[in-house]
Image (cartoon, grey):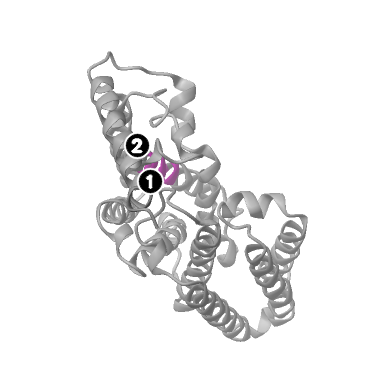
Amino acid sequence: MDPARAGSPSTSTRIVSVAARQDWALEELRPARFSARALLRACRPRQWSKNLLVLAAPSAAGVIDRPLVAAQLLGAFVVLCLLSSATYLLNDLRDREQDRLHPRKRLRPIAAGELAPRVALGWALGLAVLGIALASAIRLELGVVAVSYLLLTASYSLWLRRVVVADVLAIAAGFVLRAVAGGVATDIYLSRWFVIVTACFAIFLVTAKRYAELREHAGPAPTRATLERYSLRGLRLVLLASAAIGCAAYTGWAFTRPAHLLWYGLSIAPLVLWLARYAKLIGAGAGQAPEELILRDRALLALSLAWAVLFLGGVYVGH
């Protein structure tokens, strides 16, 4: 192989990177830009659907229809939207140089130059403070959860994202904290079954995302620092284990509630089918955006609806 040709891709990449840094350094000196539309896009409202996990514990407890509980849940949902948006702004601010070299991420408002870094930083801090204040006003314990969520996401952004396995566990823990926030906001006891099931299925979804990313990754395109240290076989094993343990925990929980066993027992079927369908889709190359995949696939939507009807039937009918 010709040494000059072998070294050319990395050399050209360095030249582009140096030139880009010079442009970005000049950009920092320009007047700060602000666009409400760009700010909203940078806050990623499509991702707010993840915060609906606050409904999980009150729904399982059968108290979601109480006016006070509904108000507390709405407040918890807003808190998590504020905190998650603050996190997205900080992540995009930190990763803007790498995002500009990515075919899709370069379109993000901060990377694309539509939102000035100073403006993004100011809004991120403001949203974080507002989220913690609102959480503490609802319940002091929720304020503690809000601070824990910010510490977790900050640790992920600064450190854990570069640590194999820990990066997956950190994101999964973020899902668990969302579910915990719903219970804490409404003062509902969270059983060990609830935490185990939530954690297992969160690990399943995050691992599926990594699996899809690893399948797509090829060549010198920028990617996650830890991605190349994973293997498809290892991720498949984690998918299988998390799904199996999650289903076993859910089944165990269902059998501890004999008065609701018919409804909860029947709800196991759509849950297992949902996981199998999702695994099939990521095996076919989908899954990099879980929220989009779930909302787009009709089979997943139908199975989600079937599970919700049976589960809520157990809560409100099967007494």
Q: Is residue 162 magenta?
A: no
Given the image, on which type of amino acid does mark 2 rest?
A: Arg
Q: Secondary structure at mark 1?
A: helix
Query: Visible in this render: residue 178?
Result: yes
Does residue 319 appear left or right of residue 176 in this picture? right
Given the image, on which type of amino acid does mark 1 rest?
A: Pro
Q: Which residue is mark 1?
A: 9
Q: 251 or 205: which is nearer to us?
A: 205
**Magenta segment boundaries in residue numbering:** 79-88
Q: Position of residue 246 (x, y in %)?
A: 55, 77
Q: Which mark is residue 126?
A: none
Which SS type dominates the magenta stretch? helix
Q: Quadrant of residue 311?
A: bottom right
Q: Earlier in the sequence, mark 1 or mark 2?
A: 1
Q: Quadrant of residue 313?
A: bottom right
Above or below residue 260? Residue 16 is above
* Mark 1 Cα-neighbour bin, 10 Å: few <14, some 14–19, many ≥20: few
Separation of disc 1 and disc 2 at Cα? Answer: 22 Å
Q: 79 or 13: which is nearer to us?
A: 13
Q: Position of residue 77 (x, y in %)?
A: 48, 46
Q: Position of residue 230 (x, y in %)?
A: 42, 69
Q: Position of residue 62 (x, y in %)?
A: 60, 63
Callouts 1 and 2 close, C-beta under 8 Å: no
Mark closer to the observer (1, 2) = 1
Which residue appears at 35% of the width and 45% of the height? 8
Which residue appears at 44% of the width and 69% of the height? 189
Q: Quadrant of residue 1?
A: bottom left
Does residue 88 appear left or right of residue 44 in this picture? left
Which residue appears at 61% of the width and 53% of the height? 65
Q: Which residue is mark 2?
A: 96
